[in-house]
Image (cartoon, rainbow, N blue to C red):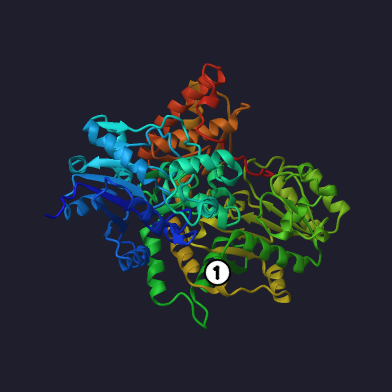
Amino acid sequence: MEKKILNIAIVQARMNSSRLRGKVLKKIGPLTCIELLLKRLSKSKLIDKIIVATSTNPQDKILYNQLSEMGVECFRGEEQNVLKRFVDLLRNTNATNIIRITGDCPLIDPLLVDKVIKAFLERNVDYGSNVNPPTFPDGMDVEIFSRHCIEKINNLNLNQYHLEHVTSYMREDENILKYNYKNDKDFSNIRITLDEEIDLGVLNSIVNYFAPNIYFTLEDIINLYKENKSLFKNVHLNRNEGAEMSSGQKMWKKAKKIIPGGNMLLSKRAEMFHPLSWPAYFDKAKGCNIWDLDGNKYLDMSLMGVGTNILGYANSDVDNFVKENIDKSNMSTLNCPEEVLLAEKLIEMHPWSEMVRFAKTGGEANSIAVRIARASSGKDGIAICGYHGWHDWYLASNIGDNDNLKSHLLPGLEANGVPKKLKKTSFPFHYNDLNGLKKIINENDIGVIKMEVIRNLQPTNNFLENVRELATQNNIVLVFDECTSGFRENFGGIHLNYKVYPDIAIFGKALGNGYAITAVVGKRNTMEAAQNSFISSTFWTERIGASAALKTLEIMEKNKSWEVITNIGKKIRKIWLDISDSHDLNINISGLLALSSFNFESKNNLKYKTLITQEMLKQNILASNSIYTSIVHNDDCLEKYSYHLNQLFEIIKKCEDEVINIDTLIEGAICHNGFYRLN
């Protein structure tokens, strides 16, 4: 009679690991990880059958095919719904118990597996393991649960996390009878799992040490650890880090290994908000909501695309217009007519201007403007005020005596890689400091004044008018950088409010409502100097950006978006002031009304900022201490934000009064400070 199958081992394995892609097929000694695991697990005396469960993700097909060729029974199910994978698998078996082993445990000890199974059967529980709390090395994890338990859970409405991490739910549910198998001594600090590149090296060292024997025991490994701890170079890694991290955090950790800095923009780094819990990546966004890689929906009361989305994320009118033009082709040998139409519109909005050049990014547009201004003035020297990007011409201002960046006005921006010969070509001055600017002009051969019209401070003593006059008197080209300020307080550049007109103005960020488009607008006699210099790039001619800008400007003009976002900014500032006053906390508010930020007058300012982000995330709100407003930030958004912020300010007040120690509230490291603005 055929033996009745009671205990089935399910080995969960997939290729799409966020930290070590394809790890289950990595070589450990002469075998792949999954081969080594299956050979060792086959020595178990209490397991009746072994099945490898992988997903229907196309990347897992290679794993499925290789195992099938080896004669290993495999099952493919949904990648993100492990519960369904278990249920579907059980339908084809008569198993009463499932032993769960993960594919990253190649050195699993069959003797230990049998001990856990035996303890489970003797106690007649629904779930058993050796991981809660762990006392065995990471990589010796064994879990077992009954068929009845999985069928019961299948009738519950689990969230996405628990659908993917089913046994985590079993450990948490108080109604599930459970048992944890403990070791006499705690060896949970030893790491013999495969999750990082460094783990692979350690595993190979262990296997090579015992070669050709692949059936060494856990006791053998522990003895090796005691004799040669230096071999275990991965003990600094946290146990079960992958299971506890969100998909976004996993990807961010991986990104920092393969992308310098982790991403393309300092302002979007997780460390700028909350190093350990910021979602980092988005799956989709709409209005003022963002969905992360795990399907969690957040209200964005933070950067709104770093100020790019005044009309909200994925504005249907803008997107549909762009899609229509994409269908006609984004690129061709010929030029797109949209760039001419957009140039006409920008000149109409700025009657002092006569010509326009386009680019994709703010840094590019600033560099184009500087090149044109230098070509027009015939001089290299630039007096600068504000933040203008990452290019050499700008960071040259940070090349100081003995490279002592801390003595300069931009201590957070490194000038490494910028040619030292550019020293004394860019000269920073403070906002509202006209005498400081005059001194720079008198002592240097200045051909360009490059500045933000406004950021944190209001102009005083006719500062902007005096700068314009100073530039005119000295034949200096005046350039206004409105990448950030443009379209936030009027329909166009904020300089229009002050009736002070530059020779060149730069626009970006909000111009395309999330699509890459920037513009350099200027007077004809200045802009024509571009013809005497080489300024050219293939993708400055693509159609998407110009199309998005045309539709964005149309909607802005129709809805008077600048009035809407300024009004919302006023409401947010009132929320900050009312809440801080009610809790007797001192804060400083700065920036444009539609782009405001606050700081606590406290030595713990950064810790409080981190706490706000940390706790707001638990309420599914993205927030720190600054907000770019958009027309989709309605009163319901503000009410939800205000309610939770008020609760946090109450806690912060207790921290200030030393009733609570702020350090006990921060989960992980505090956020980074970033670099400082000139004005």
Instruction: Say which quadrant the C terminus sits in.
Output: top right
622 in relation to 663, above or below: below
Residue 370 x, y percent position in the rendering: 71, 63
Q: Is residue 49 visible?
A: yes
Q: Residues within 10 Å of mark 1 (few under 14, many from 20)?
A: many
How many numbered callouts?
A: 1
Residue 40 x, y percent position in the rendering: 38, 52
Q: Seen from this angle, which residue lies furthest right?
A: 443
Q: Which residue is mark 1?
A: 343
Instruction: Say which quadrant the N terminus sits in.
Output: bottom left
Q: Element under label 1? A: helix
Q: Seen from this angle, which residue lies furthest left?
A: 1
Label 1 amino acid? Ala
Q: Is residue 245 visible?
A: no
Front residue (pair 505, 498): 505
652 in relation to 473, above or below: above
Q: Say whether residue 594 is left or right of residue 144.
A: right
Front residue (pair 551, 4): 4
